Amino acid sequence: MKLIRRKVLALGAGAVALPADLGTARAETERPLADRLADYADSLRYEDLDAATIERAKSHIVDSLACAVAALDEPPVRICRDIALAPADGPSTIIGTRRRSTPDLAAFANGAAIRYYDLNDAYASPTLGTVHPSDHIGACLAVAEAEKASARDAITAIVLAYEINCRLIDSLDAARRGWDTTVYSLPAVALAAGKLMKLPREHLVQAVNLALNDHVPMGQTRTQTNSDWKGLADAEAERNAIFAAQLARGGLTGPSPIFEGRKGFFQLVSSEAKVNVDAFGRRGTPFLIHHCGVKAYPAVVYSQTAIVAALELAKEIGSPDRIATLDIATTARGYEQAGRDREKWTPQNRDTADHSLPYLTARALIDGDITNESYAPERLHDARGLALMQKITVKEDPAFAKPKGNAPPTRLTAVLADGRSVSRQVDNLPGFPGLAMDRAGMERKFRSNVGHRWPAAHVDALLQALWTFEQTDNLRALLSQFALPA
């Protein structure tokens, strides 16, 4: 009879013996998630990125920097920038200036600018919420500059941050238990920053432990009346993550196992889940940066299809004054984020309005577009818009739990004053997975955001520098080109 070699997995009277191959496989899956994430971050190389992924990363750099420049004059962005510039000169550039700060504060100020208009990219998990991994581009650039890392190292870190952020929201559901999804930015940026710092694997583990333990954000960030903090929460997560990586580099340790512990992340924040790190993007396995959508409108991702549906509906019905009732069908997350709270029907500020399905749909029907001007005080308090919103109801459609298109779907059903019913459903959007925006589209969006800041020749030069980003040998010089005229 053939003997099976056995391996003892535990010592003492309660030892369990398993076949060696089974024991090895089980031991691997039972390793702490922070260790497995650190292994992945440590192993990823620029050479693992295919040409399409590198091009995609550059596209998101182009988009994110344009979004940042567009928002530089907004008061909350200025506040963050002023705070970041308060310390003595540091190694990391504050976008829009030739001045520098510490990497963590530069990441905070730059992340705030990238995110503020809600016009940067989004990754929508089919059922577990949305993240904005381009928020992390500012953090990666700040650390890369401080560490004098190569542009190729910066691209690798950006792809890494995207991958971890998107994979974690696909696997873990912190939002259902009341936490904000920016929590996934903590391990993503801690590992990206740690990689740029060239931390050894064991220090990468500690960066994750330190980042997660003390910085879990509450879901009130995006509930009821929204505040300035809605656009700054991810920037703060990045600041904390970089600080955690710096502490880990110094040799500090954090609580562990941070995910699986008796009072760890799974128990208190997300509930337990299996995260298959072996399925993460790598050579031969696609990266999730390709599944991120580039927005056309400065508004919450769940409204993007609603805005398009409203524009189509308006072409058929003409004046929105003909509408007697308007039903908006959205996803569970769309309802929770943008259609549940009564404050969404009377938004008093931009932060609430750009996360309000009733407001955005009404303004699209009335104005024929959604732009940054859609949130001007006179629009927020426009009697015609307020009256139209009172005819609107928002409901979750359970069928949208399994989307058929490339974006969170929306269906609008209007009943007109003459009794006729008109419906429009939108499931697919240009710029979202499968319909990626090409260079020409990215350049049009870039110019629309920054064209008023500089002469056309300078905008052309910026685009040329960004499309050849991987060849850049002086990141500081490149970022200095984004300084606004004095």
Image (tube, rainbow, N blue to C red):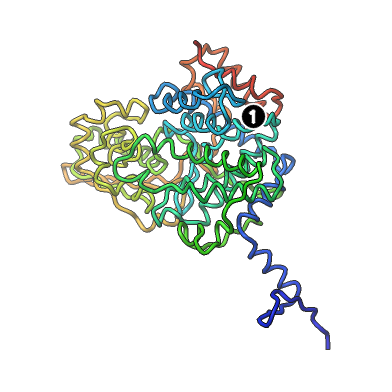
Q: Of the residues shown, which amino acid type is indicated by label 1?
A: Ala
Say which of 261 and 230 sits in front: 261
Badge 1 element: helix
The total number of labels drawn is 1
Q: Image height check: is 78 above or below 352?
A: above
Residue 106: where, in percent of width, then height? 54, 29
The spot of residue 206 in percent (x, y) is: 62, 49
Q: Position of residue 353 (x, y in %)?
A: 31, 36
Q: The N terminus appears in which quarter of the rendering?
A: bottom right
Q: Residue furthest bottom?
A: 1
Front-lying residue, 434 or 26:
26
Q: Nearer the viewer, residue 368 or 189?
A: 189
| Residue 58 quadrant | top right
Which residue is pictured at 40% across the width and 56% down the height?
176
In this figure, which residue is indicated by the disc labeled 1?
Answer: 146
337 up-or-down from 461: above or below:
below
Image point (35%, 30%), residue name:
369
Residue with the most extreme left position:
418
In the picture, measured across the screen, residue 135 lies left or right of residue 324, that is right
